[in-house]
Amino acid sequence: MIFEWRSYDLSVGKALDYLALFSREGVQHATRHLPLGGYWLAESGPLNRIHHLWIYGSLAERDTCRAGLAGEAGWTQGFMPRGFPLIERQENRLMRLQRGSAALESVVGARRAPHAALEPGAALFAPGFMTLTFGAAPDEALAVWSVEHGDTPGALVALSRGTPAAPSGATAHHLLRSLSVSPLS
């Protein structure tokens, strides 16, 4: 499996606009093609940053999925023209799983299921927090990956529920808020 972790820096003050637009007018188009694992807003560390996780069986599957999304009119003519101008910077890591959990296995098993758009008036965020840790992994991590492609090859990336203490050796430890449409929350 290939776990693609994308991080987008959004224009100052536009993160909530982007997330609301994605949750209400983008997720249903994206997940017809792309296998969503999670979607989060950073609450600490670099602000106005969102993170999302996509789970592919192979690079060939990734190419096929992304080609399908490129032909999705609701995405290319609806979401993209309004959402993409809010993005200032993008970063991408392709990772391999080192240690998982039952929660992650459940999300991997349902990764190809499309997600419905968030209903008007529904909460944008799920309750609680998650933590993203670089360089080391808390014992209670839901997933621990190693970066294969990206800026920090070989580095560990861990995702945990709640607010565990930063483990020894951590190079960054960020608090995340899950979107309501996020499978991992």
Image: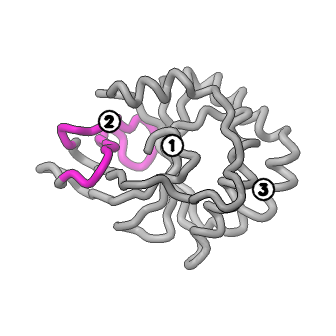
Secondary element type, mark 1: strand
Q: Position of residue 142 (x, y in %)?
A: 32, 36
- Identified at 49% across, 29% down, the residue is 107
Q: What's the amino acid at mark 2? A: Leu
Q: Report the span colored magenta.
A: 138-164
Q: Earlier in the sequence, mark 1 or mark 3?
A: 1
Verify whether residue 162 appears in magenta. yes
Q: What's the amino acid at mark 1? A: Gly
- Identified at 32% across, 59% down, the residue is 174
Secondary element type, mark 2: loop
Using the image as rendered, state which of residue 184 and residue 70 is in the foreground: 184
Q: Earlier in the sequence, mark 2 or mark 1?
A: 1
Q: What's the amino acid at mark 3? A: Phe
Q: Earlier in the sequence, mark 3 or mark 2?
A: 3
162 relative to 175, above or below: above
Residue 25 left/right relative to 104: right
- Identified at 72% across, 27% down, the residue is 64
- Identified at 78% across, 56% down, the residue is 79
Q: Identify the residue under disc 3.
A: 79
Count of marks placed on residues: 3
101 relative to 152, above or below: above
Label 3 and label 2: CA atoms lie apart by 31 Å
Secondary element type, mark 3: helix
Task: State the scheme by which the image is colored.
Answer: one colour
Label 1 and label 3: CA atoms lie apart by 19 Å
Verify whether residue 47 appears in magenta. no
Q: Position of residue 158 (x, y in %)?
A: 31, 42
Residue density around tag 1, few if under 14, some if 14–19, many if 20 or more, within 10 Å: many
Which numbered dot is residue 142?
A: 2
Which numbered dot is residue 38?
A: 1
163 relative to 137, above or below: below
Q: Position of residue 75 (x, y in %)?
A: 80, 48
